[in-house]
Image: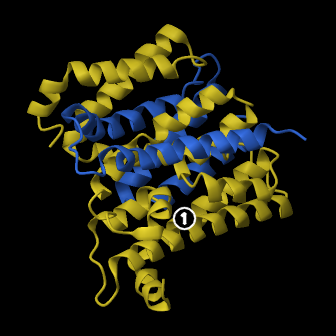
Chain colours: A yellow, B blue
Amino acid sequence: MSRKALSAAFPVTLPVLFGFVPLGIAFGLLMNAAGYHVLWSILMSLLVYAGSAQFMGVELLSAIAPLPQVAVMTLIINFRHLVYGLSMLEKYRDMGWRKPYLIFALPDETYAILSSGQIPQGIASKDYYLAVSLLNQIYWVAGSALGGLLGAALPINTHGADFAMTALFLVIALGQWEERKNRPSALLGLGAALLSLLLFGPDRFLIPALALMILALLAFRSRLEREGAAV
Amino acid sequence: MNLYPLAFIAVMAAVTILTRALPFLLFDRGKEPPETVLYLGRVLPPAVMAMLVAYCLRELEFSAVGSWAPQVIAVGAVAALHKWKHNTLLSIFGGTLLYMVLVQAVFV
């Protein structure tokens, strides 16, 4: 990868820089409040590199959740990556040694840039993809490190800061809701969650809710597709 | 040494990589993914996100005002901020700061 590829990719990644650094700081702060040293935040951001899942991870980590539960929760939150991968199959065909990293480093924001954007003139696509992916992960890791350090240095009362995860999911959900075609499936997901919450209580509702949701999505498939839900 | 955090990160990393790599492992040779997989891929993201919001708010209780009002007010604030400015970071940080003030100073 050349300097040229990096400098062509940098302006495109600026919105991600302004998003990932504050969110990374929030993640690092929460990890610190949960009693985890900044090195743990950095390690997680290096190896997991999935924002929503990492926020959920802080909560699971401080609850010392059983590992199978951790696996299921991560799978649920990151299930959408399967979709991203499907639509990047063609673009990532001839990436050579870069390919494993490109596949690993594909969170929502990187996907958004690479799936829609044009490749700048005079840069090989593989170098451009690598530069964008790498820069974005650097922002995320740097933010996490900064948050961990800030949290350790400043005596902030972080009680209530875990609401950041609720707010993050809510903002994503609201964004999806604005597209009319997403509404039937969002309502099915919410309905499955509420029904399961009533039946099983707050500690054990998630897995039944997920099963119920998938069954409902399959059962109403023809209806959802007819209403343009899946266009 | 407590190995739990290491095992925890390893599990999260492995599952995340699996979700990112599976399409390439299964369909990279030009095979078409089954219709059902494509359909679920289209409809699952909004359903999952709605479910995760419910997950975050699962501990709401209507017995004491302090155990529902901060969440409800902050959720309303996030939604209003989002409707107004459409700025993800503003909505997240505005709502979180408000929530922190509510639980630390108002509904103690």
Amino acid type at circle 1 is Phe
In front of the other: A214 or A26: A214
In front of the other: A53 or B8: B8
Who's the residue at 30% across and 56% down the image?
A89
Secondary structure of residue under mark 1 = helix
Residue A190 position within the rendered picture, expressed as x and y whole percent measured from the top left: 37, 27
> In the picture, which quadrant includes the C terminus of chain B?
top right
- For residue A193, which quarter of the picture? top left
Residue with the mark numbered 1: A20
Left or right, A184 with respect to A126, comes to left
Who's the residue at 78% across and 58% down the image?
A39
> In the picture, which quadrant includes the N terminus of chain B?
top right
In front of the other: A153 or B3: B3
- For residue A42, which quarter of the picture? bottom right
Who's the residue at 27% across and 32% down the image?
A185
Residue B3 position within the rendered picture, expressed as x and y whole percent measured from the top left: 82, 39
Q: Is residue A185 above or below residue B27?
A: above
Residue A142 position within the rendered picture, expressed as x and y whole percent measured from the top left: 65, 69
10 Å crowding of disc 1: few (<14), some (14-19), many (20+): many
Who's the residue at 55% across and 25% down the image?
B58
Q: Is residue A167 visible?
A: no
